[in-house]
Amino acid sequence: MAATWPAYAQVDASTYRIDYDPVLDTERFEDGFLRQRKQRSRALARHRLTALVPNASRSAFQSWIKTTLNGGADEFNFTPPGEAAAVKARIDGGRVRWQAASTAEPIQWAVTLSLLVLEVA
Protein backbone atom coordinates (compact mmCIF):
# COMPACT_ATOMS: atom_id res chain seq x y z
CA MET A 1 0.00 0.00 0.00
CA ALA A 2 1.41 3.37 -1.01
CA ALA A 3 1.95 6.15 1.48
CA THR A 4 -0.21 9.29 1.37
CA TRP A 5 0.80 12.96 1.48
CA PRO A 6 0.38 14.08 5.13
CA ALA A 7 -2.66 16.24 5.90
CA TYR A 8 -0.62 18.61 8.10
CA ALA A 9 1.52 19.65 5.08
CA GLN A 10 -0.79 22.18 3.43
CA VAL A 11 0.07 23.00 -0.19
CA ASP A 12 0.23 26.74 -0.85
CA ALA A 13 -1.93 26.97 -4.01
CA SER A 14 -0.29 30.27 -5.04
CA THR A 15 3.06 28.48 -5.51
CA TYR A 16 1.68 25.38 -7.27
CA ARG A 17 2.51 24.81 -10.93
CA ILE A 18 2.89 21.90 -13.33
CA ASP A 19 5.60 21.63 -16.00
CA TYR A 20 5.56 18.84 -18.58
CA ASP A 21 8.76 17.21 -19.81
CA PRO A 22 8.83 16.62 -23.55
CA VAL A 23 7.58 13.25 -24.72
CA LEU A 24 9.30 13.67 -28.08
CA ASP A 25 12.94 13.09 -28.96
CA THR A 26 14.11 15.37 -31.79
CA GLU A 27 16.94 14.36 -34.10
CA ARG A 28 18.47 16.67 -36.73
CA PHE A 29 19.88 15.13 -39.91
CA GLU A 30 22.80 16.49 -41.95
CA ASP A 31 20.43 17.92 -44.55
CA GLY A 32 18.62 19.90 -41.81
CA PHE A 33 15.56 17.65 -41.68
CA LEU A 34 14.14 17.14 -38.17
CA ARG A 35 12.69 13.82 -37.13
CA GLN A 36 10.67 13.46 -33.96
CA ARG A 37 9.95 10.20 -32.17
CA LYS A 38 8.06 9.44 -29.02
CA GLN A 39 10.36 8.68 -26.08
CA ARG A 40 7.57 7.25 -23.95
CA SER A 41 3.85 6.76 -24.21
CA ARG A 42 2.91 8.98 -21.25
CA ALA A 43 3.99 12.49 -20.28
CA LEU A 44 6.12 13.13 -17.22
CA ALA A 45 4.77 16.05 -15.20
CA ARG A 46 6.72 18.00 -12.57
CA HIS A 47 4.43 19.39 -9.89
CA ARG A 48 6.37 22.24 -8.25
CA LEU A 49 5.01 23.42 -4.93
CA THR A 50 5.58 24.86 -1.51
CA ALA A 51 3.88 23.23 1.46
CA LEU A 52 3.44 24.88 4.83
CA VAL A 53 4.37 22.59 7.70
CA PRO A 54 3.78 23.56 11.34
CA ASN A 55 6.88 23.50 13.53
CA ALA A 56 5.29 20.78 15.67
CA SER A 57 5.08 18.51 12.59
CA ARG A 58 8.51 19.26 11.13
CA SER A 59 10.22 16.15 12.50
CA ALA A 60 7.24 13.97 11.47
CA PHE A 61 7.46 15.27 7.88
CA GLN A 62 11.23 14.73 7.76
CA SER A 63 10.77 11.22 9.12
CA TRP A 64 8.00 10.52 6.57
CA ILE A 65 10.38 11.44 3.73
CA LYS A 66 13.42 9.61 5.13
CA THR A 67 11.70 6.45 6.37
CA THR A 68 8.33 5.96 4.69
CA LEU A 69 9.45 7.29 1.28
CA ASN A 70 12.96 5.84 1.48
CA GLY A 71 14.58 9.26 1.17
CA GLY A 72 12.03 10.40 -1.43
CA ALA A 73 12.58 7.48 -3.83
CA ASP A 74 9.29 5.69 -3.18
CA GLU A 75 5.89 6.65 -4.58
CA PHE A 76 3.04 8.09 -2.57
CA ASN A 77 -0.52 9.24 -3.21
CA PHE A 78 -0.84 12.99 -3.72
CA THR A 79 -4.02 14.93 -4.40
CA PRO A 80 -3.20 18.09 -6.39
CA PRO A 81 -4.92 21.32 -5.30
CA GLY A 82 -8.36 21.62 -6.88
CA GLU A 83 -8.47 17.94 -7.91
CA ALA A 84 -10.59 15.15 -6.48
CA ALA A 85 -8.46 12.18 -7.52
CA ALA A 86 -5.05 11.32 -6.13
CA VAL A 87 -2.06 10.62 -8.38
CA LYS A 88 1.06 8.53 -7.75
CA ALA A 89 4.02 10.84 -7.18
CA ARG A 90 7.61 10.78 -5.95
CA ILE A 91 9.97 13.54 -4.89
CA ASP A 92 12.21 14.65 -7.77
CA GLY A 93 15.73 13.59 -6.80
CA GLY A 94 14.75 13.52 -3.13
CA ARG A 95 15.48 17.27 -2.98
CA VAL A 96 13.56 19.21 -0.32
CA ARG A 97 14.25 22.82 0.72
CA TRP A 98 13.22 24.08 4.15
CA GLN A 99 12.79 27.76 4.94
CA ALA A 100 11.14 29.48 7.89
CA ALA A 101 7.83 30.92 6.68
CA SER A 102 7.21 32.69 9.97
CA THR A 103 9.31 33.31 13.04
CA ALA A 104 6.43 34.36 15.28
CA GLU A 105 4.49 31.68 17.15
CA PRO A 106 3.22 29.38 15.83
CA ILE A 107 6.29 28.84 13.64
CA GLN A 108 5.63 27.46 10.16
CA TRP A 109 8.08 26.03 7.65
CA ALA A 110 7.88 26.51 3.90
CA VAL A 111 8.92 23.25 2.28
CA THR A 112 9.72 23.62 -1.42
CA LEU A 113 9.90 20.52 -3.58
CA SER A 114 9.14 19.09 -6.98
CA LEU A 115 7.05 15.95 -7.48
CA LEU A 116 7.33 13.65 -10.49
CA VAL A 117 4.03 12.28 -11.79
CA LEU A 118 3.65 9.97 -14.76
CA GLU A 119 0.46 11.18 -16.41
CA VAL A 120 -2.32 8.70 -17.04
CA ALA A 121 -2.85 7.99 -20.73
Image (cartoon, rainbow, N blue to C red):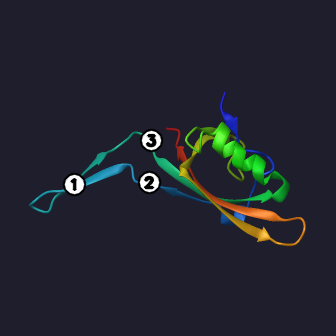
Query: Residue 33's x, y, as percent?
Result: 16, 59
- Marks 1 and 3 sit apart, C-alpha to C-alpha, by 20 Å
Q: Earlier in the sequence, mark 1 or mark 2?
A: 2
**Residue drawn 81% across the image and 50% down it:** 8
Q: Quadrant of residue 48?
A: bottom right
Q: Amino acid at mark 2?
A: Asp
- For the N terminus, the image quarter is top right
Question: Which residue is painted at 69% across and 40% down in the image?
Answer: 85
Residue type, mark 3 in image: Arg
N-terminal of the pair, mark 1 or mark 3, is 1
Local SS, label 3 = loop
Quarter assignment of residue 78? top right
Q: Is residue 102 or residue 40 the one in the foreground?
A: 102
Extreme-top residue of the structure? 1
**In the foreground, 121 or 69:** 69
What type is the residue that disc 1 sits on? Answer: Glu
Evaluate if marks 1 and 2 touch, with contact meaning CB atoms under 8 Å apart: no
Circle 3 is placed at which residue position? 42
Task: Give the side of residue 41 with respect to residue 91, left or right.
Answer: left
How far across and how far down the image is residue 42, in percent? 44, 41
Separation of marks 3 and 2 at Cα, in angstroms = 10 Å
Residue identified by numbered label 1: 27
Comes first in the chain, label 3 or label 2? 2
Cα distance in 3D space between marks 1 and 2: 17 Å
Q: Residue furthest right?
A: 105
Kindly identify the residue that appears in the image at 64 percent across and 44 percent down: 66
Residue for badge 2: 21
Q: Tag 2, which secondary structure?
A: loop
43 or 8, nearer to the observer: 8
